[in-house]
Amino acid sequence: MKAVGYTQSLAVTEKNALVDVEIDKPQASGSDLLVNVTAIAVNPVDYKIRHRVNPEGGIPKILGWDAVGEVVEVGNEVENFNIGDKVYYAGDLTRSGSNAEFQLVDERIVGKAPKSLSDSEAAALPLTTITAYEMLFDHLAIKKQSNASDEVVLVVGAAGGVGSIALQLLKCLTGATVIATASRESSKEWVTSLGADYVIDHSKPMAEQLRELNVGEITHIASLNNTGAYMDDFVEMLKPKGRLALIDDPEHLDVSKLKQKSISLHWEFMFTRSMFETDDMIEQSNLLNEVSALIDEGKIKTTVGKHLGKINAANLIEAHKTLEAGTAIGKLVLEGF
């Protein structure tokens, strides 16, 4: 089958940073589904793995952790899916990725794809949806309710993939006041369109801007980038006993600053459940199905930023370049081989 991978960790500017390859088609067993991949999205994790992991023995490493496709084979322990089902999922970091015509994935981390979206529109959603949902409701423990609440949530770096779905989940499922950060005019317009009540600029002192909004202290912060640099602002803005969750990898994080206000710190990594096969692993399937229903009800929209064409090495290299430059708004998607 066709796939895109790499055999040597190279800079994205190098000719063979990613290459088109032919590999064996896998077979489903146990709780696995074999999915014929029709569309994918690209995430920062893709280039981070390409930078950090150097394949051994000349065996191509296949990246990709966002996919939509059709189930073509089921393992003997599969209970919730049938051949022919259209599905979407982020997959498992420890297994071969979705930049291939066919992929094996455990049914417990797979959802039924939204019927109202095209394959490429749906491919933009799984990884960021799981990350945002777990961050907001598992870690930050924001209350799900339809009426207004006294919760004030700040989403830092809100114009990216995770922020784009987090804003929508907050407006759709909670009564919280939602503040987004964005620094460019295009980003400010994007986050406002997704439901942010207020927008502040993270390139300037945030605590001062927050005071001007007069919305009170922040109860929850979802920090999606540069957490270490913003820590002083976070401590100042957060209410005593507030909650801070992050997804990035700061080199230095002085958590002692959180003590005086008894601020709790939470790290979200959406691959934890699949990597360790946790007892609640199926919750990723459940949340993907919940969001799929919300999409088909018109309550949440896709976060596609740009369609880059077919799934091949040249187009994936362009996606990696854009993500490494930090200029993407919304998700980058590719479709078909």
Image (cartoon, grey):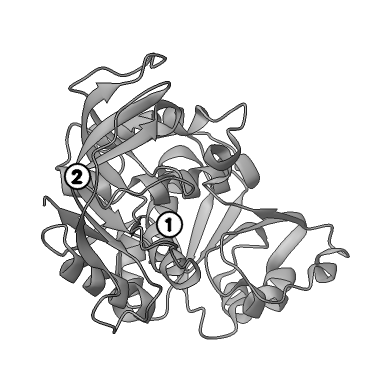
Task: Give the quadrant of residue 61.
Answer: bottom left
State whether residue 120 is above or below residue 287.
Answer: below
Q: Nearer the viewer, mark 2 or mark 1?
A: 2
Crowd tier of the residue under label 2, counting other residues whose Cα lies within 10 Å: few below 14, some 14–19, many 20 or above: many
Figure check: 81 above or below 302: above
Q: Picture quarter containing residue 320?
A: bottom left
Depth order, front residue of 133/282: 282
**Apparent side of residue 42 relative to residue 196 in the rendered image (left or right):** left
> Badge 1: few (under 14), some or many (20 or more) residues near its Cα, within 10 Å?
many
Q: Which mark is residue 162?
A: 1
Cβ atoms under marks 2 and 1 closer than 8 Å: no
At label 1, which amino acid type do we have? Val
The quarter of the picture where the N terminus appears is top left
Residue type at mark 2 is Glu
The residue beneath circle 2 is: 101
Q: Nearer the viewer, residue 295 or 60?
A: 60
| Extreme residue in the right direction | 260
Out of 111 and 138, give the one closest to the viewer: 111
Position in image of residue 252 (x %, y %): 71, 76
**Residue in view at x 47 percent, y 34 percent:** 284
Horizontally, is 328 left or right of 251 in the view?
left
